[in-house]
Image: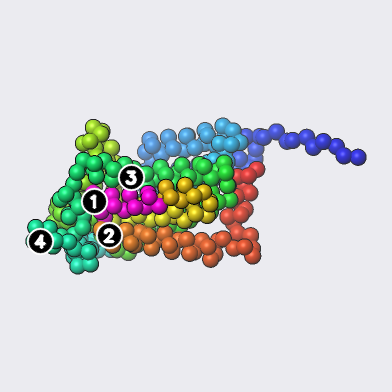
Amino acid sequence: MSSDVIPVPYNRFSTSNLKIASIFTVLYLAWIHISMGLRIEHVGTVIFLITIFFASKTTRNIVLGFGFFILYAILYDSLRVLPNHEISPVHIIEPFNLEKMLFGLNLDGVKVIPGEYLFAYKTDFQSFITGAFYLTWVPLPLIFALYLFFKNKKLLIHFTFTFLLTNIVGFIIYYTYPAAPPWYKIYHGTELDFSILGSAAGLLEFDRLVGIPIFENMYTRNSNVFAAIPSLHAAYPVVLFYFGLKNKVNWMSILFFIDILGIWYAAVYSLHHYIIDLLLGALCAIIAIFVYEKIFNRKDKTTFLDTYTDLIRR
């Protein structure tokens, strides 16, 4: 004799939920307090995340599904604790000269880097399009991740984990080889000045066109002036494209490939990155994808990514 299974109602304040929220809150606030000092935005972040974590079963799983993104944000914010120029010497002229040697172009009889060449022929159309593409470097992965949450939770966890791996590889290079962006060499020469704020450089043209200081506000708050190599702007769309292919939705793959071209062109045009930065950024993505595929995407055994995926399927 069969009987109907009575579904267990979701308990937002279950022991497991309270444990997850408590561990995250204590560890995060303790780390921030010890390392850099609590600011209002840190407390606000915790309140926001905890609120949506307990709001419903769906929002809880979204927070957990975006867990690797959250960890990335914490790591990125923590870079200010120990600036890379305190670990290794900063390189200004070396990447500039290498870029000129490998990819230099003739501008009125003078050999210049590609960024200088492109910006010398800047137009409002190019400035608008490149600025628009540059704004997609984080929102597009977030939108894709939200799509995967509802369509393919396993691929979501694998995508966000590889995204985190890509950043870790990039951060290691940041500290191994601190490098100034093209705009620093062009605007300030080869003198090392740690008091200089980040600059939107060529992206100020986009701000002028839209009448809002979007990039100006973004880059003047950037504490990583000497973190041009590798370009994680170049790395993110490569990871996005790879998982777009794994998602097997053709129009998405095409969109993500176009995003690679747009962001890469924008990075050079805006004087934020050298071509060598882009290639090394792509290499970061390739290394992360290789590690993910060979170690964490095992078909012969269950990995912690499978366990984590089950957590957001409950």
Q: Does the magenta stretch mainly form a helix, a strand or a loop?
A: helix
Q: Identify the residue at image location x=62%, y=62%.
A: 299
Dot placed on the residue nearer the N-terminal end, 2 or 1: 1
SS at badge 3 = helix
Dot placed on the residue nearer the N-terminal end, 4 or 3: 4
Q: Which residues are magenta?
A: 257-273
Residue found at the very far left of the displayed protein: 109
Distance Cα–Cα, label 2 vs label 4: 19 Å
Q: Residues within 10 Å of mark 1 (few under 14, many from 20)?
A: many
Name the quadrant containing residue 95.
Answer: bottom left
Tag 3 residue: 133
Q: Identify the residue at image location x=51%, y=61%.
A: 292
SS at badge 2 = helix
Q: Nearer the viewer, residue 116 or 273?
A: 116
Amino acid carrying label 4: it is Val
Any part of residue 192 in sight: no
Q: Which x, y percent locates residue 251?
A: 47, 47
SS at badge 4 = strand
Amino acid carrying label 2: it is Ile
Tag 2 residue: 275
Dot placed on the residue nearer the N-terminal end, 2 or 3: 3
Distance Cα–Cα, label 4 vs label 3: 30 Å
Tag 1 residue: 269
Distance Cα–Cα, label 1 vs label 4: 18 Å
Q: Residues within 10 Å of mark 4 (few under 14, many from 20)?
A: few
In the rendered view of the protein, which quadrant contains the C terminus?
top right
